[in-house]
Image (cartoon, rainbow, N blue to C red):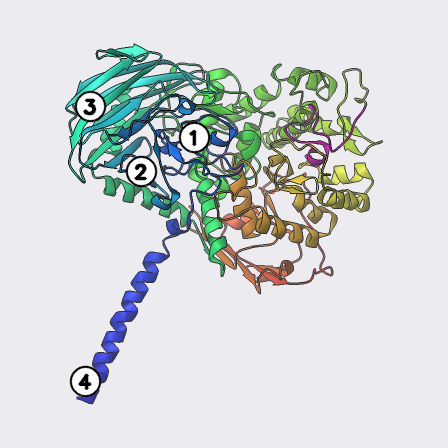
Amino acid sequence: MKKFGLLTLFFAMFLLQCKESADVSSQVKLTSFVNPFIGTDGPGNTYPGATVPFGMVQLSPDIGISGWDRIAGYFYQDSIITGFSHMHLSGTGAGDLYDILVMPTNSRFSERIEANHFKPFSSFSHEKEAASPGYYMVDLLDYDIKAELTTTERTGVHRYTFPKDDSTQIHIDLGYSLNWDSPTETHFNVVDDTTIEGYRKSTGWAKDQRVYFVIKLSKPFKSYQLFKNDSLTKSPVTGKNTKIILDYATEEGDQIILKTGLSTATIEGAYKSLEEEAPHFDFDDIRNQAEDKWEIQLNKINISMADDTKKHIFYTMLYQSMLAPTLLSDYNGDYKGANDSIMNAQGFDRYDTFSLWDTYRAAHPLYTIMHPNRVSDMVNSMLAHYKETGLLPVWPMQGNETNMMIGYHAVPVIVDAYFKGIANFDVDLAYQACVASATDASRQIDEYMALGYVPAGDDEDDWSVSKTLEYAYDDWCIAQFAKALDKTDDYNTFIKRSENWKNVYDTQTTFMRPKLKDGTFVEDFVPKDYSPYFCESNAWQYFWSVQHNIEGLTDRVGGKEVFEKKLDSMFTLNPLPEDVLPIFSTGMIGQYAHGNEPSHHVAYLYNYIEKPWKTQKLVREILETQYQNEPSGHCGNEDCGQMSSWYVFSALGFYPMNPAQGVYAFGSPLVDSATVNLENGKTFTVKALNNNKDNIYIQTISLNGENIDRNHITHKEIMAGGELVFNMGNTPNKTTKNTIAPSSELYN
């Protein structure tokens, strides 16, 4: 009997342990560590709504009031919601999209305000709001309506839970616009009492945006009101400003599912989106599928960290790295091309929303590790843009070239992909596209080729020094491409052009300085001033933008000792109280601005002068201070994955200082361990032994069991799988030979 009692106790304990294991298993779902609200306050400009990795649809709440803080439609400090639109930009400074606004209402509240152009709205509380990958929920307090959102790649799915009301309505507004966006032509056709089709054409940052849609409802509407320019009309209707109000009578707890299929090409493509991706009205099933898609992608990197807060930040950054680029082509392969024609992508998914001035630095190198198969589609998308326009994209969105920012930075993305063995794109066409973009007469490239630099002018956004430096880096990439393809003359041309940074280096001030067409430098030059000659930066921040020849830059300033002092000053020359900092100068450490991309590689430069412990100290400081698990957790615009990709790389302990080189410089790993599950079936593991907030310095490094005395790892070594081990300590190790691959040498 006693024995039986012990067995019973043992069995009960076993069952309890099994239950606890199951509970732990459910708690360790990586999506649970993602906080989509990071960046929705402060300068981050992110949105909290539902999407899937790289999806066409970003279904998210809109406050309904324009302004810089609401550039992504939502601002955490606000207290009203004007509806839920289907497309948004992640972390940019560009106010566009917000297509197809949906808002449920009833008779409980009818107030209107001028600030949101007298559209229906409701108050809301963050206490009754939640978001996770692929899902968003909020209670519309004034109506007592619960709104839930989820998506597939090309469909947005709403679930509204209503109270009892004989005057329940669902508003679908195509005339709604925010910030830079403005409709040019919209169309509704009421097919039946559960189906509405149409399109919204608009202009803004994207000058010719087209979204075709089909909306299906789970419950027939009893009647509808269709408006053109606020006047009642009949279906079908076409006009600049159209909207439809669907009328329902609901009982307590009634749920209505509204699903929207999208295409940038045709209404037929929108129907296909619904048929293929959301053929039913099971909201929870679609939500679970969206969460599973995120779980698969997040599981490509499994980390171990003692600090759960930092784990939340890491997986949110990993999540945000996959919010762009976004799908442009529909299920038929059709899409609105950059030549304003309907094009067809054969054998690849067409992507757009490439924030290349930002993302060439870290986001695209991260994709070559995590998503090499998708990178092939991204490269083919850039080549499609070239075939449509004659040039590679600069900052393309929704089948438009916005020409925002500078450089021809599709080049490093393509060249990096080529040297990393990314397959399935036409190499000859890619090379042709790179050369065409680098020899076009637009964007002052003609002057750059003639003079060896972009001359300073009188434009408000002159950016001449920044253009020179960015063009020179891209030219280095083309030179490497030419060399690999045995195009010797081209190699000689572009390698010479890659040294054009020297033409704007001023030996007197030891800075890159704007130069006039006559060859003289601009007078009244103050390096910390934010002048028109530097793109969203000053001379301190852009001085280091010679990622392809750090050794040459070091020699030019007078050697490693002088270079070190200048680097030290970069991080200690704090802005004065009377200094006026522009909106993009955020995350400041001295003159270093982590909130803007030109600074992102600078902390890693100490590796090139044999002082890696200074890199380690600074990288850890940036990781700890510039990212937080809170709505204001981004120190600057997230910029379509760049800010988050910097964090992912740096937390793992390495970073692509020269993005197209195939080399990653070591920093100071934040994770205790990480396993990168590669698409080729291999795993690459990072371990940081004795790692904590004090032990920020690397003592020794081993790769696959062998000690190494270098401060970098190559892309090939990562993709081959293996184990990288950092032994950490609280004092700098200044005794090891601290070599690093020269910044100008490819490792492919």
Q: Which mark is residue 141?
A: 2
Of the residues under marks 1 and 2, which one precedes in the sequence?
1
Residue 587's quadrant in the figure? top right
Does 459 sit left or right of 310 as displayed?
Answer: right
Q: Which mark is residue 225?
A: none
- Using the numbered discs, state the Cα–Cα distance from disc 1 to disc 3 in whole angstroms: 27 Å
Helix, strand or loop at label 3? It is strand
- Place of residue 423 in the rendered image (x, y in percent of width and height, measured from the top left): 46, 35
- Using the numbered discs, state the Cα–Cα distance from disc 1 to disc 2 in whole angstroms: 19 Å
Q: Amino acid at mark 2?
A: Leu
- Using the numbered discs, state the Cα–Cα distance from disc 3 to disc 4 in whole angstroms: 65 Å
Q: Write the start and end of the magenta stretch as one range.
A: 524-545
For label 1, the crowd category at 10 Å Cα-Cα, with few meaning under 14, some 14 to 19 and many 20 or more, is many
Query: Mark 4 or 2, which is nearer the eye?
Result: 2
Q: Nearer the viewer, residue 654 or 181?
A: 181
- Using the numbered discs, state the Cα–Cα distance from disc 3 to disc 2 in whole angstroms: 28 Å
Of the residues under marks 1 and 3, which one precedes in the sequence?
1
Q: How would you classify the magenta stretch by its main secondary structure?
A: loop
The residue under the point 46% across, 18% down is: 204
Q: Which residue is mark 3?
A: 195
